[in-house]
Amino acid sequence: MKTLRFHAYGEPADMLHLEDAAVPIPRAGQVGVRMHACGLNPADWSLCRGLFAGDLPRGVGLDVSGTVQAVGEGVTDVGVGDRVLGVPDYRGYPSAGASDEAVLAVWTPAPQGLDLVEAAALPMAVETACRSLDILAVAAERTLVVYGAGTMVGFAAVQMAIMRKARVIAVAGDTFAGKLCALGAEVTPYGDGMVERVLDIGGGAPDLILDAGPTSGVLPDLVTIAGGDGRRVLTVSNHGAAADELGVRNSFDSELRYSVLGDFAKLAAEGRFTVPVARSFPLEDWREALDLSLSGHAHGKLILLPTGAAARA
């Protein structure tokens, strides 16, 4: 099979290579799938740069949908031929989701009516957004600011918070502003005056703030919006000393939980939840997908398809 992986840490454009590899065999409690679609995330490029360093070579691609080809010992909820979406065991094998075949450590059945390309956009965005809202204790009648509401985690979080009947103020660019308004969020742009605009819309400091944006250096502004209380702010993208000094919480402080993935897959199949897909590329065109991702102008989820597949705009 073909797989996209790296043999040393560094910049992904330099370290990633599409190469031949053995088909991975699922262990107990795992399933092997023929990949239908693989969602790309900024975390993939962080893996290349040394995040969660471990044995090499290692693959990229943390969101996968596909058809089950093999089941490990003890697996009873799915069988060969079933459609699933989930997360590959990227630490336990020398390949991950960006491969013609992959082993999933976490999965849920893909509901009838859910396109498998759309399914591959869900796992990481759903898990991160839901866990972040749980940490913040977002609930009805609370006001939540989502900074970076046009990122896939941010877009998912806006929908989830509105489902919880929270008031949502979304900070986002033009690409998703209209869609966020249609969901029920109050939207304001990035740039000069953002702090004042958010405070004006909210009538003062909001209850909670989720930082899902890629902008470094924004945390002081978000703490100002929060009335100086860093504990009201949770970041999924700006971890480190700056967050610690401001008292900002971060998403790395809690265990991953994918138990909600099946529920949101069902909502997506019903047209009640979505993570927008921008473009898809066959695996052999991975470099074009990488360049678009790193440009910051993807405007939605980027998807890799198996080798030989036709790209979808």
Image: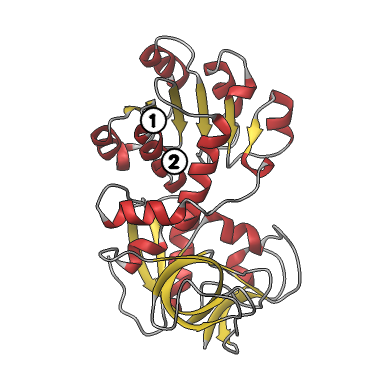
For the residue carrying disc 1, how many other residues have a C-alpha within 10 Å: few (<14), some (14-19), or many (20+)? many
Q: Give 94 or 261, whichever is nearer the viewer.
A: 261
Left or right of residue 119: residue 294: right
Q: Which mark is residue 170?
A: 1
Which residue lies under the disc numbered 2?
154
Q: Secondary structure at mark 1?
A: strand
x then y, percent, for residue 295? 46, 54
Numbered marks: total: 2
x then y, percent, for residue 272? 27, 47
Residue 135 against residue 141 in the figure, above or below: below
Q: Secondary structure at mark 2?
A: helix
Place residue 204 in its image quadrant.
top left
- Quadrant, the C terminus: bottom left
Left or right of residue 239: residue 146: left
Disc 1 to disc 2: CB gap under 8 Å: yes
Question: Which residue sits at x=59%, y=84%?
Answer: 24
Left or right of residue 183: residue 36: right
